[in-house]
Amino acid sequence: MLETIREYATEQLTASGEEEAIQERHVQYFLRLAEEADPRLHHPTEGDSWLARLEAEDANLRGALAWCEARQDMLEIGLRLAGALAWY
């Protein structure tokens, strides 16, 4: 059922003409999250909670990285994202 909903939502997003803008906002959000998490992953009291937060968003992080890889104009942002996630 969830896959059917996901396919429908993807079709609607593509039809709206807003897919690229939404993807860019998605990448920017997860870049900010990863850059905020990066220094905190090594903190003795905060590290575990930040690791759990990143693990909960694993599929979104992977999707953002994949989208950056597929777009020539997003390679720099993809590298920043990958760098921020290096310890993750």
Image (cartoon, grey):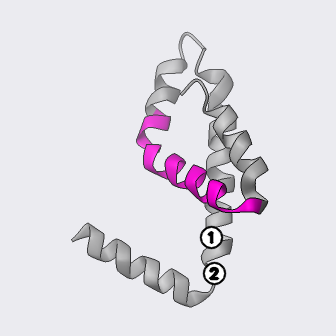
- 20 vs 54, nearest the viewer: 20
Which residue lies most toward the bottom here? 15
Question: In this rendering, is residue 84 above or below 15?
Answer: above
Q: Amino acid at mark 1?
A: Ile
Which residue lies most toward the top here? 44
| Residue at (68, 23) in percent of width and height | 39
Residue 61 picture location, percent across and down: 53, 47
Q: Which residue is mark 1?
A: 22
| Residue at (47, 36) in percent of width and height | 53
Asked whether residue 63 is drawn in magenta, I would say yes
Is 6 displayed left or right of 43 in the figure?
Answer: left
Q: Quadrant of residue 43?
A: top right
Residue 86 picture location, percent across and down: 61, 28
Q: Quadrant of the N terminus?
A: bottom left
- 48 vs 80, nearest the viewer: 80
Residue 14 picture location, percent across and down: 54, 83
Question: In this rendering, is residue 53 above or below 5?
Answer: above
Q: Which mark is residue 18?
A: 2
* Pointers 2 and 1 in contact (C-beta within 8 Å): yes
Is 11 displayed left or right of 29 in the figure?
Answer: left
| Residue at (69, 48) in percent of width and height | 78
Q: Amino acid at mark 2?
A: Glu
Query: Disc 1 on helix, strand or loop?
Result: helix
Q: Which residues are magenta?
A: 53-72
Q: Quadrant of residue 3?
A: bottom left
Asked whether residue 65 is drawn in magenta, I would say yes
Determine the CA span between mark 2 and mark 1.
Answer: 6 Å
Q: Residues within 10 Å of mark 2 (few under 14, many from 20)?
A: few
Question: In this rendering, is residue 16 above or below 20?
Answer: below
Query: Disc 2 on helix, strand or loop?
Result: loop
Examine the residues drawn in magenta and state their main secondary structure. helix
Q: Which mark is residue 70?
A: none
